[in-house]
Image (cartoon, grey):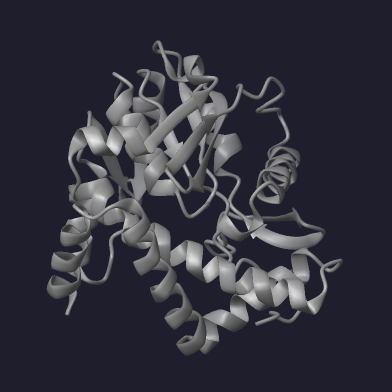
């Protein structure tokens, strides 16, 4: 089944983008209707983070979240198998792109928007610099090989396994290889702290602050927004007040700024993740 699915995705690489997005729309609706457990996760996340929304708005946003999630997944067909010129046309890299030029140690804060692979593809294809990121092995080895190949398609891209530890990552950072970091998920209470996220205490890894400090690096946010023409990849100016000497305060500030990014495109965030699974002592998980 995995091999058959990947063959279909390669086939979508030659289709017009509206057709690809239509396939994603249909898949998103199917997932919304059939995957009840994950639908409840999205509903719970949105109710916690946007208590001011009506129930009708929450449910509409949930359906749209599933559609965007599925569309981005199908988009990997042309991202990883489409003609290189076509990929470049569909990925609009804009904003403070100069922040990613040169050889200054840089941590790229890439939140979990559905276009995260589009953002990675854009910078590795369009910028003449070595980039690194952290990769978690997939249980399905066929899918694992496909993802690894796709994320190393362009440029000089190095993927560090989590089991390798932080030492080679820090060395690469100090050598001028930017780290594409996605620290805004619940990875478990080990090495994590509880800081507010939309007013709710969220188990959060403080890796953005720590990598920036250890790598003597600046932090540059990168936001990937799905559009009707592909993706807009916006590079924001480097944070001037980050990192500080207080890791907890830095992590809280990261979540606060993340909220402002999410507010600009709330249904493109990765709400299918159990963001509030781990709770402070005495609190019950909301799922």
Quadrant into which the C terminus falls? bottom right
Note whether 272 is above or below 80 in the view shown.
Answer: below
Left or right: residue 101 versus residue 243 is: left
Name the outermost residue toward the right.
52
Q: Nearer the viewer, residue 49 or 160?
A: 49
* Residue 129 placement (x, y as % from top left): 31, 20
Residue shown at the point (44%, 47%) measured from the top left: 116
Can you see residue 132? Answer: no
* Residue 30 placement (x, y as % from top left): 43, 82
Left or right: residue 54 versus residue 205 is: right
Q: Nearer the viewer, residue 262 or 71?
A: 71
Left or right: residue 219 versus residue 1 is: right
Image quarter of residue 93: top left
* Residue 37 placement (x, y as % from top left): 53, 86
* Residue 102 placement (x, y as % from top left): 40, 10
Residue shown at the point (57%, 67%) measured from the top left: 64
Count of residue discs:
0
Residue shown at the point (65%, 56%) measured from the top left: 266
Image quarter of residue 223: top right
Note whether 184 is above or below 251 in the view shown.
Answer: below
């Amino acid at each position: 089944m995995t091999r058959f699915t990947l063959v279909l995705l390669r086939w979508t690489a030659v289709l017009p983008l509206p057709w690809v997005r239509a396939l994603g729309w249909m898949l998103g609706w199917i997932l919304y209707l059939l995957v009840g457990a994950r639908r409840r996760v999205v509903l719970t996340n949105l109710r916690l983070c946007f208590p001011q929304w009506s129930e009708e708005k929450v449910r509409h946003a949930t359906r749209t979240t599933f559609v965007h999630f599925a569309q981005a997944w199908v988009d990997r067909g042309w991202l990883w198998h489409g003609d290189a010129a076509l990929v470049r046309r569909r990925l609009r890299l804009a904003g403070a792109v100069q922040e990613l030029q040169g050889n200054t140690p840089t941590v790229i804060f890439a939140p979990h928007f559905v276009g995260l692979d589009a953002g990675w593809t854009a910078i590795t294809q369009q910028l003449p610099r070595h980039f690194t990121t952290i990769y978690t092995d997939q249980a399905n080895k066929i899918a694992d090989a496909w993802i690894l190949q796709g994320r190393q398609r362009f440029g000089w891209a190095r993927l560090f396994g989590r089991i390798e530890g932080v030492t080679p990552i820090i060395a690469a950072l100090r050598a001028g290889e930017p780290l594409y970091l996605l620290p805004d998920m619940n990875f478990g209470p080990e090495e994590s702290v509880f800081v507010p996220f939309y007013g709710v205490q969220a188990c959060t890894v403080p890796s953005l602050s720590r990598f920036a400090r250890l790598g003597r690096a600046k932090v540059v946010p990168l936001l990937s927004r799905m559009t009707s023409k592909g993706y807009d990849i916006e590079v924001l100016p480097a944070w001037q007040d980050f990192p500080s000497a207080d890791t907890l305060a830095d992590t809280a500030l990261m979540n606060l700024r993340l909220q402002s990014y999410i507010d600009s495109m709330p249904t493109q965030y990765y709400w299918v993740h159990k963001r509030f699974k781990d709770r402070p002592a005495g609190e019950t998980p909301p799922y």
